[in-house]
Each structure stands twice: as structure tokens, then as C-alpha cells.
Image: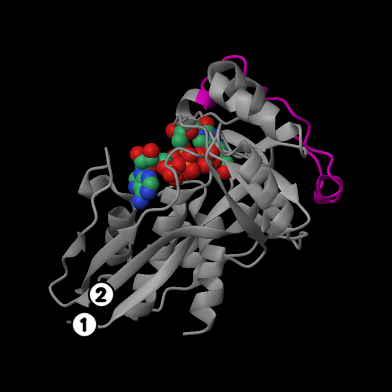
Amino acid sequence: MNPVLTLPAPAKLNLMLHILGRRPDGYHELQTLFQFLDHGDELDFSLRNDGVVHLHTEIADVPHDSNLIVKAARQLQTLTGTTLGADIWLRKVLPMGGGIGGGSSDAATTLLALNHLWQTGCSEDQLAQLGLALGADVPVFVRGHAAFAEGVGEKLTPVELPEPWFLVLVPQVSVSTAEIFSDPLLTRDSAPIKVRPVLEGNSRNDCQPVVERRYPDVSNALNLLNKFTEARLTGTGSCVFGAFPSKAEADRVSHLLADTLSGFVAKGSNVSMLHRKLQSL
Ligand SMILES: C[C@@](CO)(OP(=O)(O)O)[C@H](O)COP(=O)(O)OP(=O)(O)OC[C@H]1O[C@@H](n2ccc(N)nc2=O)[C@H](O)[C@@H]1O
Ligand SMILES: Nc1ncnc2c1ncn2[C@@H]1O[C@H](COP(=O)(O)OP(=O)(O)O)[C@@H](O)[C@H]1O
């Protein structure tokens, strides 16, 4: 048995999300602030010499070849022409369709892991570009630093943010990103804003009113969390989050809400735990 490389795939939060307009291809121009959480999936990678990419873990409603992990691996094979393959296992922790980027993070971890295992020598720029074709959120996970993102999420300016503890509530609904971006009532004309006012807290999530209207469970979660701290939607949801000064305080509120809503407590981090682990290899 070949040695196994085990790496994390952390979640992200969109601390704010403004929609500036719609491009001719239908995609929306955004401004968003990404921070990572010390909480996520975990993947195991083992080298194969026959070029086969085999993900051994099935996830509900996602066929093997549509899984972003498999797609990422194959894209890297195509780009580099390597004849190597991999066996991959996934421990799925992050809720799907939750706006915390699980699929995108799995894809980014796969690109970085296999570039390392296959010794394909791609630069971070090349991997971020490859990742963008898989999803708008993949590049920030490849870069691994908290960032102010523009364009569709690919123009990244690294930022240093406070690293509070977050309580993330997980309403039991999966929100389709495409459905929210096609809603006629979505705000699409927010004025561009500079990083500084964003860091001073002058922001919101433009998707939130549309998601709240369509998903009462999300609206309930926001109302409940708002009783304790300012609550906000991440991405297109369904997850909502609030910041706390300590783990003890976040845990306390989590326990108070536990009968009504599931969730988890995790620390915000400006350097993703994937990159911290890679630096130690
Ligand atoms: C909104 C964000 C914010 O971080 O996160 P999530 O809530 O999905 O995690 C992302 O931009 C989501 O990125 P991602 O989840 O990769 O979206 P994609 O698969 O690329 O796009 C799904 C669909 O959403 C719409 N879409 C997505 C991104 C964007 N900037 N404009 C869009 O109009 C398009 O209709 C697209 O077909
Ligand atoms: N490895 C993966 N993990 C999660 N979802 C995946 C994966 N590969 C493909 N998908 C698909 O991507 C969709 C969005 O996944 P996810 O990243 O978890 O949500 P979000 O973009 O809301 O944060 C899923 O509903 C699923 O159909």
C-alpha cells in the first residue's frame, strides 16, 4: 500500500457579499469578503501508477465523475500530461449547498495535494486558474488567505481580519446558487465599495432578502441568532453565522439553540488550515 497523504478542506464564510451587476454570460459581478473556518472535510490521497483517478467515497446525489474532487484531479492530469493517478477518500463533514464552500474546498485541496504527490510543479497561479473553471470559489481556497474578492470571485486582494469564534447554524435546506442568482428580485446594482469601509463593517449580503423570502427556515435561523449577535447569511446560504469573542460564548449560544437548530462552532482563520498543514510537510 502506498503512503497516504491526509489533508483538510476547510469551510469558508462570505462575511459580506455585494452584487454589482450581471455580465453578458449571465454571471454576476460580486464584491465579497472570504474568511476560512478551522472546520471542514478531510481527504486522503494515495498515488497510483496507472493513471486512474478513483474516489472511494460516495456522496448522495453526486455521481463519481461529477464530483468536484474527480473533476479537479482530471483537469490537473490534462494540464500536466502526467501518467499518474490516485486513490482518494473523503470524510464529508460540511453540509452541501450550505454556502460554506465544501465542494469548492474539496476541489482546491485535491489540486494542491495531487500537484504535490504527482510532483507536477504547477504554480499557485496555474492551480487557481484551473480551479476557477471548476467553480468561482475554488481560487480563494487554492490561495489559502482571507481575501476581498471581486469579479466573480477570482480577483483576490489578501486581507488581515480579526479571527473571532463563529457559531454557524445549518438550516436543514439546501439552497441552489443558480436559483438565487436568477431571482428577479435580487439586488444587482450595489455601488462598488473599497476594502476599507468593508473592513469597518459597512456591508451586507445582497442575497439575504431573496433567500429569506424563499426559505423560511433560513429566516428563522437569522432571527434566532440575531437575539445574541449580529447574524448574517454566508454566500447564497443556507448557513447563517454570528461572531463571538470567545469559544465559550459561542458554545453557550450553540447549546441554547441546540433544541431548534443544528450548527457548529469554529474559529475564523486568515490562513487556511490546508495551507498551515502543507507548510508543515
Ligand atoms: C455565491 C458564492 C459566494 O462565495 O458562494 P456559494 O453560496 O455558492 O457558496 C459563489 O460566488 C458561488 O460560486 P460557486 O458555488 O462556485 O458557483 P458556480 O458553481 O460557479 O455557479 C452556480 C450558478 O450560480 C450563478 N452565479 C454564480 C456565481 C456568480 N458570480 N454569478 C452567478 O450568476 C450562475 O447561474 C451559475 O451557473
Ligand atoms: N466534493 C463535493 N462536495 C460537495 N458538493 C459537491 C462535491 N462535488 C460536487 N458537488 C456538488 O456541488 C454542490 C454545491 O456544493 P457545496 O460546495 O457544498 O455548496 P455551496 O456552494 O453552497 O457552498 C452540491 O450540492 C453537489 O451537487
Q: Which residues are magenta?
A: 180-205
The residue beneath circle 1 is 2
Residue 215 lies, with reference to residue 120, above or below; the image says above
Regarding residue 78, the answer to whether it shows in the image is no
Regarding residue 71, the answer to whether it shows in the image is yes
Give how far apart the Cα atoms at labels 2 and 1 are: 6 Å
Q: Amino acid at mark 2?
A: Ser
Q: Amino acid at mark 1?
A: Asn
Exactly how many numbered labels are in the figure? Answer: 2
Which class describes the residues within 10 Å of circle 1: few (<14), some (14-19), or many (20+)?
Answer: few
- Magenta includes 194? yes
* Residue at left offset 54%, top offset 17%: 214
Mark on residue 112? none
View quadrant of ligand 2: top left
* Residue at left offset 55%, top offset 34%: 259
Instruction: Evaluate if marks 2 and 1 touch, with contact meaning CB atoms under 8 Å apart.
Output: yes
- Residue 263 lies, in percent from the top left, at 55, 43
Q: Residue furthest left?
A: 50
Residue 20 lies, with reference to residue 165, above or below; the image says above
The quarter of the picture where the N terminus appears is bottom left
Q: Which one is nearer the viewer's eye here, 139 or 209?
A: 209
Please identify the quarter of the rendering in which residue 96 is found: top left
Q: Which one is nearer the viewer's eye here, 216 or 3?
A: 216
Viewed as shown, does residue 195 lie left or right of 47?
A: right
Q: Which one is nearer the viewer's eye here, 75 or 175?
A: 175
The residue beneath circle 2 is 46
Viewed as shown, does residue 222 lie left or right of 182?
A: right
Which class describes the residues within 10 Å of circle 2: few (<14), some (14-19), or many (20+)?
Answer: some
Q: Earlier in the sequence, mark 2 or mark 1?
A: 1
**Disc 1, SS:** loop
